[in-house]
Structures are given as structure tokens and as C-alpha cells.
Amino acid sequence: MSRWLRRVFLTVIVVFILAPLVIVLVASVSTDEVLSGWPSGLTTRWLSEALGYEQFRVGFVYSVRVAAIATAWSVLLGTSAAYAIHRFDVPGAAFLRTVFIAPLSMPRVVVGFCFFVLYASLVPAAYGTVGGVAFGHILLLLPFVVSLVGAGLANLDPELEEAARDLGASPLKTFLRVTLPQIRASLIIAVVFGFLTSFDEVDLSVFLMPADTTTLPVAIFLRLQQNQDPTTSAVSSLMIIGSLLLAGFVALAGRRAGLFAAPKRKEERTT
Amino acid sequence: MTAVRRRLGLLLVAPGTAYLVLAFCSVVLLLVTYSVRTEQTSTLFAAFDLGTWRGALADGYLWSTVGTTLRLGLLVTLICVLIAYPLAWCIRTLRRNWQIAVMLFVIFSPILVSVVVRSYGWAMLLRTGGPLGGVFDDWLYHEPGVVLALVHVELPFAFFPILAAVRAVPAELGEAAADLGAEAARRFWRVQCPLTMPGLLSGAQLTFTLTISAFATPALLGGGRVTVLAQSIYQDIQQLQWPRAAVQAVVLLVLTLIVLAAFTLAGRLIPGSRRPS
């Protein structure tokens, strides 16, 4: 491909990827009710309306609580499982690894429906509660955590841990003092990625809550099915900005902690 | 010592496994049991009845929904691969690190944004009076609009496995082929392309399985006119037709498993593209 053609292609792709995000951002500060081109004026009216909209406010708190619980549990369960699979001679380690990744290929709608049936028929108390939704989300996040932490552990030298043990450190102390600091990059990524995944999740969550108390994306989804107005753009904008800020913060923090040092070196070698 | 470590390992892996057994296996079992209950029943302990299955399989509606779902899956996967593959090679030719970083971030960024927000963005672009409303008449609330938005949603999942494969092809191979007299097209088709087939397959596999189970995007951009399995399941639940929803969920699950198996088989059959395990 010629240089020129390549440049046009890349530009088209960038425009295609960013266009739907940009229009949401522009619509949220534009005075026009229906955006057709360049906005005729700027306003913060939609933003303040979105902040005052009860369902969005409730949804935000709900989403944060679900995401926090689901992330905490999946990191706890996933990290210990990955550590056991990689470091202790657990019988059937290869099989276990497959089992922990398997939920990833389950369609989320199917998972959502299954949990709905489970709650509706056996544990009605869990339907619509933060814990009930979070319990379902753990299934989505666990594969990420196990594979991310697993990859982090695979890059480590097990001899460092052996040395710590030879020097008399207990397994817990070895993990906390030797292993944990070395896999913290994988853990940070797992936490942030897990939190965002849970926070933004719709396909599964939509089955687990009544229409009046839902997570934020589900509240937006349900509102969009009724009507589309700039208030929805405004709350969507806040979600975009929040996600990007969180990701940017992690990238910066990670860079300072030397998180990207290892893969970068590898890239230089291959190119 | 090894016995102690083994026991400790089991102890560590047990909670996660217990969760999976509880959440994963039990719900699948529940799903299958539910699909063999009498229609109109929303209790678990109803009589065994294959009527829902028989009715659904004889009904043209299920088949048309499956047809739409698979058609969208094929189209979106094809378009995603056709974009992602040259895109990955383009990015490989970029020399400056910051250019690579910016491109990768742009391509990854949609993953950080809720699928609802992205679909809403497309709805705003395509609607009458919107920036693209005049150009792409009638795309919104019809299949082309759903395809367009789904391509946007799934593109990163097609792109990153392909990029990994493209990056793993050593530059020396191309040079060696050139030294032996192969021109650019031949170098690509005979040397570089076959080596990236495993990445292309896993990208396509991921895109296909994600697309056939997509819910929010078809619901928002199809406007009720384009019905995929995922939506149909949701609608049946709202109409309290739980066994029928279960039947469709089983169908979707089976479709997903068939797709996974087909791609794994394809990966084995394509010569020289055996995936490193």
C-alpha cells in the first residue's frame, strides 16, 4: 500500500471509531434539541438536567456499588485461583485454567436469563439487589482476572519466591512481600478493567433488575427505548469522560510505576 | 512439603471453582430444565413437557430470528476482519512510537465506553435530521444501521488478535523472500499472510460469538424491526413466556458452541496455522 493510501485509510478508521463518541459529547453541550451539524450555541442545561434526573443519580450509585463488589470479589477469587494454578501443583491445572476462561464464551444474554430464572424461582430475595447483580457480574470478570494475573505470574521468576521461602517466609508472607509487588501492574489493570466492564454492563444486567431501580447503563437503555433527548447525551458524555479519565489515570500511574516498560522492550525487538 | 503446598493450592482454587460450579453449571442446568416446562409456566416445578420445544421449532418466527442473528453475525464478522486485517498491517508499518500509541488507544477506546452510549451515538448520527441522516437514508431502524453500529462495537475484538499475529511475523522473513526473488504480492500471499491466519481466525471467532449474542445495539438501532435471538429472549421474559425464552437461550448457547467448535476445527485444518498452545 502506498503511503498516501495508508494515511487516508487510517484517517477514515479514526473518524469512524470516534464519530459516535464525539457526537454524543457535542450533543450534550449544544443548544439544539436535534443535532444536524455544528451546534448553534453552547449550554450546560442538559448536563444539569442529567445530574438532577433521579433515575440517573440512583443508577450511578447502584452501578458504582455493583462494580465495586463484583470487582473486589472477582479479584480475590481470581487472583487466588491464578496463583494456585501457576504456583502450586494443583491437580488438573490445565483443565482448571480452561474452566476459569470458559464463561467468557457464554452469551451474556443467556447468562442474564439464567440468573434471572435462578433468582426468580429459587432466591427471590436476590432479584434487583446490588448483591444479586454483582454476583452475576463476577462471572464476567473472573476470566479477565484469572488470565491477566496468570499472565503476570507467568512472567515472574519463581526462584524469587523459592528464595523467600528458603529464608523462612511463610506462604502468605511470600505472597504479600515478594509476589504481590511484582504482579501489581496486572492487578491494577484487572481492577480498572473489571470495574469499567461491570459499570458499563447492559446485556446481563438488564435481566436482573426491575425498571425503576437499575444500574446507570440500564437506566439509559430503558430511557432510550422511550425517547431520545439531549439529557441522555449529557449523562452518556459524563460516562465517556469518566471512563477515559480512569483509563488515562491508570496509564499515567502505570507508566510511573514502570508498568509498560517490559512490553515496550519486546516491541522494539520485534520491529 | 509438596503435599502441604498441594493442599494449600487446592484451598486457594476452591472458592473460585465453587463459585463457577454454583453460578455457571447450575444456571445452565436450570436453563435446560426450564426449556422443557409447559409454556406459560413461571414456576420451576411444573410438569415435564416438550411442547415448548416442539412449538418453537415448528414456528417460522424462531427460524427467522435465528436467520437474522446468523446473517448479522456473518456480515459483521466479515466487515470487521476486512477492516482489521489491513489496519493491523498499516499499524505495523508506522515508525514513530507515539503514532502507534495514539492509533492503539483510539482503536481500544470504544471498549472503555458503554455499548449503550456507542449505539446511542450511531442512532444520533443516522437519524433523520442528523449529520448522516440524509446520506444514509433509511439505515436507522433497519439492518444496515445495526450492522454499522455492531461493526463499531466489535472491531477492537477482531483487531487485537490480528495485530498480535501480524506483529509476530518476523521482518526477516519478508526480506528473505525478497532475496529469493519474490515480488511484494507473492511475499504477502505465500509467506506473511499464512503466518497470520491463526490470529485472523481467533479475531473472527471472537467477533462472531460476540455479535450473535449482542443485545443492546440491535435493540436500540433495530427499532423493533430487526429482531435477533437476544432481543427475542428479552421480550419473551417481559411477556412472562419463560420456557420459550429458555428454548431460545438454549438455541443461542448451542449456536455459540457450534461456532466455537467450527473455528477450532478450521484452525486445525488450515495448514501451517496451528495455534501455539
Image: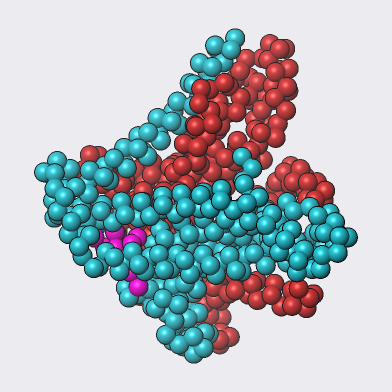
Chain colours: A red, B cyan
In the rendered view, tell whether residue A226 sits above or below residue B273. Answer: below
Regarding residue B147, the answer to whether it shows in the image is: yes
In the rendered view, tell whether residue B200 sits above or below residue A37. Answer: above
**Side of B137 where A109 appears, left or right:** left
Horizontal and vertical percent position of residue B83: 61, 69
Would you say residue B132 sits in the magenta stretch? no
Q: Quadrant for the C terminus of chain B, please.
A: top right
Horizontal and vertical percent position of residue B13: 49, 27
Regarding residue A232, the answer to whether it shows in the image is: no
Task: Label the magenta part by its dominant secondary structure.
Answer: helix
**Side of B125 where B104 appears, left or right:** right
Image quadrant where residue B199 sits? bottom right
**Residue stretch rendered in magenta on the structure:** B226-236
- Front residue (pair B79, B26): B79
Q: Quadrant for the N terminus of chain B, please.
A: top right
**Side of A141 where B43 appears, left or right:** left
Image quadrant where residue B228 sits? bottom left
